[in-house]
Amino acid sequence: MTVLHLADDGEAADLAAFLARLLHYDRGAAVRLQATGTTLAVFGRPPSFEVLAVRAVRLAKPYEDGLELQLDVTVSAGELLESVDESAATAAVPAAVTGPPWAGVLPPRAGWRPEPGLGAPHALRATVAAAVAEFRSRTEELPAERRTRAELDRIGREIWSRTVGDTGLPVRAVHAAQSLGFLRPAPQASTEEPVALLSSGAWLRLRTPYGSIAVRRAGLGALNVSVR
């Protein structure tokens, strides 16, 4: 079994927290792992948000397993979480599983360019809070006979599909970033962690110091899909 040596116990703890959050939304979650050099990219797709979450994990040394210099495998998120040893800063790669469809279509590795208009992290968190409050208010106002799953889903789609300003980034992507621990409040009130909006072909990417959320832009079909 391949054992990954992570940079430190903090990296191990962050990886474990990310996997636990994915499993909160999907107990049978799978993740795709890609390791090259000293970076392990962990891809997951929480079904509630319809986005792709990417967590980059630092490795203590360049990945190498025999003659293989790259790792690219889809595994059970739960089994990977069980293998994480935070004190030793290691994680064992579980046996490969048949990946879900999303695991075969990943954002491109290069060609990303900055997009304007995203706003500061505190403004993004305020946008999510306002959307949550609106959803709660509108659903609570529904009469009992209309409070069906279909109606709740319709209201949710309407709210979470709105975009952040003119960026084209759906609010659900920002919600996902916050829910998965990527959009954290600054340790000090005067210090804002940098965030950025990037684009490449049909993809938009919300990048924070803790991870990224990638989403396909509506109406662009299958342009610039990267199948690995």
Image: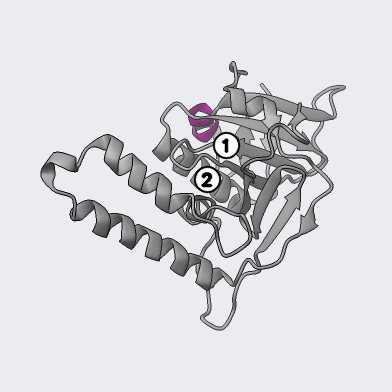
Picture disc at residue 44: 1
- Report if the CB atoms under discs 1 and 2 are less than 8 Å apart: yes
Question: What residue sits 64% from the left and 38% below the top?
Answer: 42
Picture disc at residue 225: none
| Residue farthest along the right direction in this orientation | 67
Q: Which residue is mark 2?
A: 18
Q: Where's residue 45, x and y in %?
A: 54, 36
Q: Where's residue 174, x and y in %?
A: 52, 56
Write the start and end of the magenta stretch as one range.
77-81
Which amino acid does the dot numbered 1 rest on?
Gly
> In the depicted view, which residue is nearer to us: 17 or 154?
154
Question: What residue sits 55% from the left and 56% below the top?
Answer: 182
Tell whether position 179 is magenta.
no
| Residue farthest along the left direction in this orientation | 144
**Secondary element type, mark 2:** helix
Quadrant where the N terminus lies?
top right
Q: Cα distance, mark 1 to mark 2?
A: 9 Å
